[in-house]
Image (tube, grey):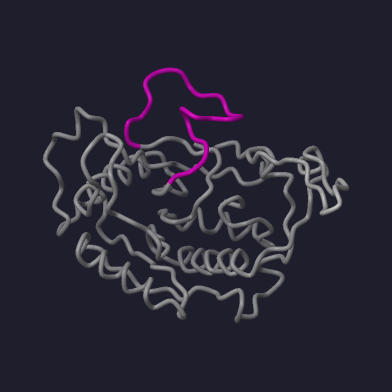
Amino acid sequence: HSSEVVGNPQLNAPSLQLQVTMPRERSRSPRASATQAGQSLAGLSALLLGLERRPDRRKRCEDMLAKEVPWLKAEFFRASDGKLDTIPDDEVAKTWNTKNNSLYGAYEDVHDKDGKLLYSAQDFSDPGVDYEFSPGERGCAHSHYRMWQHAAKAEGPTLILEDDVQFIFERNCGGMSNGSTFTARLELGMKEATKKEADVLYLGWSGHRDGNYKHHKSTRGRKNPVVRKAEYVWTTVAYVIWPKGAKKLLEKAKPLDQPVDNFM
């Protein structure tokens, strides 16, 4: 069940993406109640990540969770503040190199104000260009590092939510997403992820996965309508992580040397 993570071959972690858009033929089936969760979600703990100096974002998210998924017990997790907190260099590096990300990101030539070439598009691929983490990037990376430490000690999977997560949106298959549709999709996703012994189940999505691979080869046959194998993801807004997956990430994060979504 291992995925070949291009650009980071050391971390062979099965990572799956939840297909949020339910097929039309299934969308007419009865919805799960947002007030109740099935057996696959029993005992699922959740961490809500946010900055202490942004109580407005915390309140919006906690109000949404209370209304839409009252079955979910989410604990507020104080984010590392890259502008205020001291972040150990052996946990999160101060710089990161673009070589891995260039396999998926579209880099262009960079010139200074006088038109002199600073970096060519090729430089970003080989040998890669070193950038300093912004305070926000470094704080975000350290926040997830600390949540992996928490998840590694848990008895079961941990749902991680950033405080800009949104459950209410227009679905590609028609209608609106809400707590009921989220609960129903998450139940299906957790069942599939458990069968596949996944390390991570991504709930938010931007990037490449089976059906939209960039470097991997898709397997033939009918695609799983619930989950797809992830190749590269540009978001950490919402994901479920199992203890063994958290331990794998922590083992490789010595230090964490990419923006956290790229690193994963």
Q: Quadrant of residue 131 in the image? A: bottom right
Span colored in magenta:
205-226
Q: How many marks are shown on the rendered structure?
A: 0
Q: Main secondary structure of the magenta part?
A: loop
> Left or right: 104 with respect to 207?
right
Residue 210 included in the magenta stretch of the image: yes
Residue at point 46%, 49% (across, down): 200
In the depicted structure, whether residue 187 falls above or below residue 36: above
- In percent of width and height, residue 169 lies at 29, 49
Residue at point 80%, 37% (across, down): 122
Foreground residue among 152 and 130: 130
Foreground residue among 139 and 225: 139
Residue at point 81%, 48% (across, down): 111
Residue 51 included in the magenta stretch of the image: no
Q: Quadrant of residue 36 in the image? A: bottom left
In the depicted structure, whether residue 123 falls above or below residue 153: above
Residue at point 41%, 61% (across, down): 160
- In percent of width and height, residue 9 lies at 67, 41
- In percent of width and height, residue 209 lies at 49, 35
> Left or right: 171 with respect to 160?
left
